[in-house]
Image (cartoon, grey):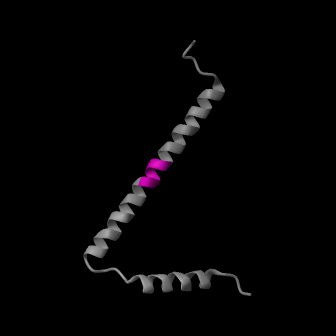
Amino acid sequence: MSNDKSPDELAALRLLEDREKRYQETLAQLQEKITAGIDSLDRGEGIDGKTALQKLRENIISRSPEQ
């Protein structure tokens, strides 16, 4: 069997490589945000869960269309 790839196979491989690259970049960004969040909590800059949930609810309500 030959190692030569058809144009469709090459295109599919490029798409997979691009997707993997974007995934790895997104993962790295997420890891940086998690690390920053943990560092913030370690410095005592966090808020309690009840307050966080209330802020999320307010944010969701403020973004919902008028009814």
Q: Nearer the viewer, residue 27 or 53?
A: 53
Q: Nearer the viewer, residue 44 or 7?
A: 44
Q: Which residues are magenta?
A: 23-27
Q: Is residue 6 above or below residue 41?
A: above
Quadrant housing residue 43? bottom left
Quadrant housing the C terminus = bottom right
Q: Is residue 25 above or below residue 37?
A: above
- Residue 67 vs residue 23: left or right? right
Q: Please, which residue is most extreme toward the right here?
A: 67
Q: Please, which residue is most extreme toward the left here?
A: 43
Q: Residue at x 61, y 32 (%)?
A: 11
Q: Is residue 66 above or below residue 28?
A: below
Q: Residue at x 62, y 27 (%)?
A: 9
- Percent across and percent down for residue 3 are 54, 16
Numbered marks: total: 0
Q: Residue at x 48, y 82 (%)?
A: 53
Secondary structure mostly seen in magenta is helix
Q: Residue 24 lies in magenta, yes or no?
A: yes
Quadrant housing the N terminus = top right
- Percent across and percent down for residue 17 are 52, 38
- Percent across and percent down for residue 12 are 61, 33
Q: Is residue 40 above or below residue 66?
A: above
